[in-house]
Every structure is written in C-alpha cells, then in structure tokens.
Image (cartoon, helix red, strand yellow):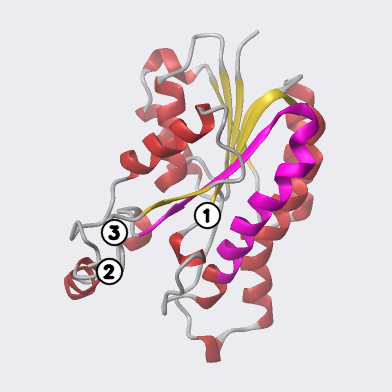
Amino acid sequence: MGKVTVITGGTSGIGRGIAEKILAESAAEDRIFVTYGHNEDKAQAFLENLPREKRSQVVLVKADMSSYEDMMAFVAELKDQADHIDWLVSNAGVSTYAKYEDYTFEEWTRIVNTNLSVPVFMVKELRPMMSEGGSILFTGSYAGQQAYSSSLVYGVTKAAIHFLTKSLVKEFEPKGITVNAIAPGFIETPWHSARTQESYDRINKKIALHRFGTVEEVADMAFAVLGNGYMNGSVVDIHGGYDFF
C-alpha cells in the first residue's frame, strides 16, 4: 500500500517545492493530492515540469481554500479516492500589503479564513483518515514569531497557526500522529516578484546570511520534519538569521 500525501496550495512557491521534494523521494506506488486555488496555467505548469514518470502519481484538485464549502468538497473527493492519509501538509495561504488603516472586514476575514479557519476544519475532517504514525505539517512563518511591519493580518494568522500546531498534539496523540510547523523567513518566491532592489537590500542587511532563502532549502526542511518520527509540537524556524545580525 503506497503512501498518500495531501498538500494544499502545492502548485507554486513553497508548496510547490515541498510537493516536488516529496515526489522526488517517493516510490512508484505513492500518491500525492495537490490543491490549487484559481490559476489553471500554473497548476498545469507544475504538472508538466515534473519528470514524466512522476506525473501519474499526482492528483490535482481545484479548491478555493478560503471557502469552507470548497474545502468540504475537496475532503469529499479525498474520501472518494483514498482510504488513508499518511502525510498532510496545510500550506495554502494569502496575505496583503495593505496598511492597517486601509483594512476592510471582508479582506481580513478572507485572509483569516484561508490561513487559519479553513485549515482548522480541514484537519478536523481528515483526522479519521490519518494513518497511525502519520504526520501533519503546517506552513507557518517567522512573521508569526517576530512582528513584521508589512502585514499585520498575515503575522496574526501565522502566530495562531504556531499555537494551533502545539494545541493539536494532544488531539492526535491516540494514533501517534505528529503535528509540526515550519516558520520560513524571507524566501525567494513569486510572492516577492514586485519587490524593488532597494527593498531586497534593506531586508538582506537584517539577515545574517545576507540573502533570501530558496524554496528548495525550505522544502528540504519540511521533508525532514515530515519524516522525523520524534518531532512533535515543534515550530521550526528557517530564516537565515533574521534580526540576529
């Protein structure tokens, strides 16, 4: 029986890197369910970029993870296509660079739903499918450890994800399922495509390694945490020494 992995928001950025790492290390009988929100072209590009022999292991599912209804439809599809889940990676997330004084309740709610509320209920719904000794991984953020000026709502939701990680340990103890999170700092993803060189330089001065991290470095860390049977309730920073310099 092959390993079944589920990853939300797995067709771009850090999620894509984690999905590609898991696939690279997978056996032929393993399967990975990958959600994407809206961008069909990006989802297809992810699939076509994989080695040909790996593509049949991937099940792409369109699901708006800001929507409880879409998440529940995704859960129903999972239950229809798989009889268990070994690894669950809750990665889908959004942010805004709007100033606090310009926030609307609707935008706040959309981001909180995507980053926190919908993942809480997705994990709740999928708990019966999780295998003994399985692993759950949340993508948190160093913005949830150290307040950044760029997005208040993002940092608040990620701080909540870190606390959720620790809180769920007891919930999954009966089946020996581990629950952990990674907390990346500034990572080179499409999210930063509009950033100016001045902005890069200013941030790099605050990082001891004086550079943004790579998606591959975060994916390697995520894979190591997923596969470590004794890590439980941990939030693992990966930020190059941000604010240490």
Do the residues under discs 3 and 2 have CB atoms within 8 angstroms?
A: no
* Magenta region, residue range: 156-185
- Depicted 80 relative to depicted 44: above or below: above
* Residue at the disc numbered 3: 241
Pair 1/2: label in front: 1
**Label 3 or label 1, whichever comes before in sequence order:** 1
Q: Which mark is residue 140?
A: 1
- Depicted 20 relative to depicted 28: above or below: below
Q: Is residue 91 magenta?
A: no
Q: Residue 188: give x, y in percent of width and height.
A: 30, 53
**Label 3 or label 2, whichever comes before in sequence order:** 2
- Magenta stretch mostly in which secondary structure? helix
Amino acid type at circle 2 is Arg
Q: Residue 228: give x, y in percent of width and height.
A: 51, 29
Q: Tell me if I can see residue 90 in this picture.
A: no
Figure label count: 3
**What's the residue at 53%, 68% (across, down)?**
154
Q: Which mark is residue 195?
A: 2
Amino acid type at circle 1 is Gly
**Secondary structure state at the residue bearing disc 1:** loop
Amino acid type at circle 3 is Gly
Q: Is residue 166 magenta?
A: yes
- How far apart marks 1 and 2 lie (CA) works out to 21 Å
Depth check: 2 or 194 in front?
Answer: 2
**Secondary structure state at the residue bearing disc 3:** loop
Pair 3/2: label in front: 3
